Amino acid sequence: MNHLSTPVLPQIPDIVISRLPIYLRTLRLLKDQGVEVTSSQELGELLGLSSAQIRKDLSHFGEFGKQGTGYNVAYLCNQLEKILKVDCVWPVILVGAGYLGHALASYTGFEHRGFRIVAVFDNDPKKVGGAIGSIIVQPVEAIPAVVRQHRCQIAIIAVPASAAQQVANQLIDAGVKSILCYAPITLTVPPNIRVEYIDPVIHFQHMTFYLEKGCIEE
Amino acid sequence: MNHLSTPVLPQIPDIVISRLPIYLRTLRLLKDQGVEVTSSQELGELLGLSSAQIRKDLSHFGEFGKQGTGYNVAYLCNQLEKILKVDCVWPVILVGAGYLGHALASYTGFEHRGFRIVAVFDNDPKKVGGAIGSIIVQPVEAIPAVVRQHRCQIAIIAVPASAAQQVANQLIDAGVKSILCYAPITLTVPPNIRVEYIDPVIHFQHMTFYLEKGCIEE
DNA sequence: GATCATTTGTGATAAAATGATCAAAAATAT
DNA sequence: ATATTTTTGATCATTTTATCACAAATGATC
Ligand SMILES: NC(=O)c1ccc[n+]([C@@H]2O[C@H](COP(=O)([O-])OP(=O)(O)OC[C@H]3O[C@@H](n4cnc5c(N)ncnc54)[C@H](O)[C@@H]3O)[C@@H](O)[C@H]2O)c1
Ligand SMILES: NC(=O)c1ccc[n+]([C@@H]2O[C@H](COP(=O)([O-])OP(=O)(O)OC[C@H]3O[C@@H](n4cnc5c(N)ncnc54)[C@H](O)[C@@H]3O)[C@@H](O)[C@H]2O)c1
């Protein structure tokens, strides 16, 4: 009951976490270009952020830089990969073998950033059994077994909005913990499940607020 | 020089603008379901936001509700569409006719939310001249003329990261004002140009921070 | 028509995020 | 060897964002 028994564990703001993958992406790019050392200022200029922001974000996790010099690019990459737990490859499943599902399933850019699509599902008998690269489309009934087999915690939803909630329920029942939803709809899920969304129209509608109106019709 | 000569024009926070398309998306869904009236509380529950947040966001633009009753769904949709300037259809051009470009160009969900892909460009002679639905892929050299012809202010970049900055420069030179970038790279652009990004890996890496480590290898 | 249950819009308050500042450390120049 | 420049990480100040709480309005109920 004394003050030592209730240590304040430093809860790291989610907005900080959300910037780390951006830092990592740019650091990997610098590394690939052969850059060995960078500074919070250089990184800030590349990303359109203040150098103080970057330093403060990183300071939540430790001291990675050297005064007067900056940050060793390869070392900081490694550290960020550890922090984000992407110093390995995570299995991901994909539901919906339509246009978008095909693009995602055949995308080669996931693997070297920590992710691999290990299975694709669809409820259309005409799609089931078809191949996307080396992956055979399976029926949705196979989801639970595949999730268990791969201990898969992450899923992508690429089905029409009208089916997305039902698919989300099936995924959560099967044990999936995080969902990336491409359907233009907000899902209702239990509080322990994380959902993130990708909807290009949301971005377009954000842009048009700042544009001068210039339309085709209506 | 008196205090009346410098009226404080109420600058609306960008974070407020970024939520409006989400509100609109859900309101349209309610409308399609035949719901005529809703409340900030109901909307908040659907979206995982507080009712106060929604009321305050809307209050930046006027009074759209009725005390004791709530909001007329159709009316609020209309108002949000006006505020976001999507009470019409905006022309959008797309650069990159690869897997992702094909999925985007054949996507039918843009039109009724205010956007139409009017042209697709690629620099691969094997792709130029090919058809995606009713759209013929054009060479990148045709970008300036098409942008002028449609007075197009919005473009999508769906080319490899290594080509994205160069394509962005071409688009900006041609007069494009807003870019939605699918390439996993942060673009450098003048301050009057808006860029937004879609990169699923950024979302995955955000998710894994909160997951218990469970990887395939490495 | 008085009472009650809702729900909005908003000023006040609290919390969170960002930005400015600076001592200390490291590298480089003199 | 000393001075100068650079850059981090921490602290403090400011700005921004979110939440709270309530008067006023509305419709329903008795
Ligand atoms: N194509 C794009 O570029 C694009 C862009 C933005 C958003 N989206 C969204 O992504 C999602 C997929 O788009 P798409 O163009 O690939 O659509 P699509 O119609 O080509 O494919 C959808 C697939 O989902 C399958 N499906 C339907 N119900 C299912 C269920 N209950 N269980 C399993 N599978 C089911 C269908 O059989 C089909 O194969 C949609 O929600 C769409 O709004 C797509
Ligand atoms: N496919 C996906 O699901 C997916 C997922 C996430 C991110 N991405 C990103 O989206 C982009 C496109 O991905 P993709 O899978 O369609 O790639 P892709 O290789 O299939 O297609 C890229 C297209 O861009 C064209 N191109 C290359 N350089 C060009 C230039 N300078 N001007 C015009 N066109 C040019 C190519 O000819 C090709 O047709 C990439 O940056 C990729 O990282 C794709």
Image (cartoon, coloured by chain):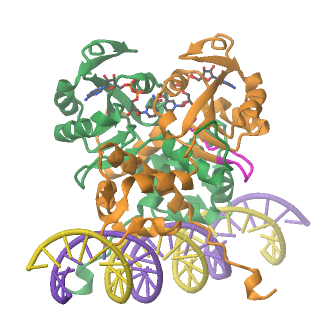
Chain colours: A orange, B green, C yellow, D purple
How far across and how far down the image is residue A7, in percent?
70, 78
| Image vertical order of residue A160 relative to residue B172, above or below | above
Quarter containing the C terminus of chain B: top right
| Image vertical order of residue A16 relative to residue B99, above or below | below
Q: Is residue B112 left or right of residue B177?
A: right
Magenta stretch: dominant SS? loop
In the image, what residue occupies the spot 64% across and 62% down?
A: B50
Query: What range is drawn magenta here?
Result: A182-194
Q: Ligand 1 is in which quadrant of the figure?
A: top right
Q: Which is nearer the eye, B112 or A128?
A: A128
| Image vertical order of residue C6 relative to residue A29, above or below | below
Quarter containing the N terminus of chain B: bottom left
Q: Which is nearer the eye, A9 or A82?
A: A82
Q: Quadrant of residue B102?
A: top left
| Image vertical order of residue A34 relative to residue B163, above or below | below
Q: Which is nearer the eye, B200 or A161?
A: B200
> Is residue A186 within the magenta segment?
yes
In the image, what residue occupies the spot 28% across and 34% down?
A: B163
How far across and how far down the image is residue B17, in percent?
44, 56
Q: Which is nearer the eye, B203 or A37?
A: A37
Q: Is residue B181 in sight in this rendering?
A: yes
How far across and how far down the image is residue A148, in percent?
77, 33
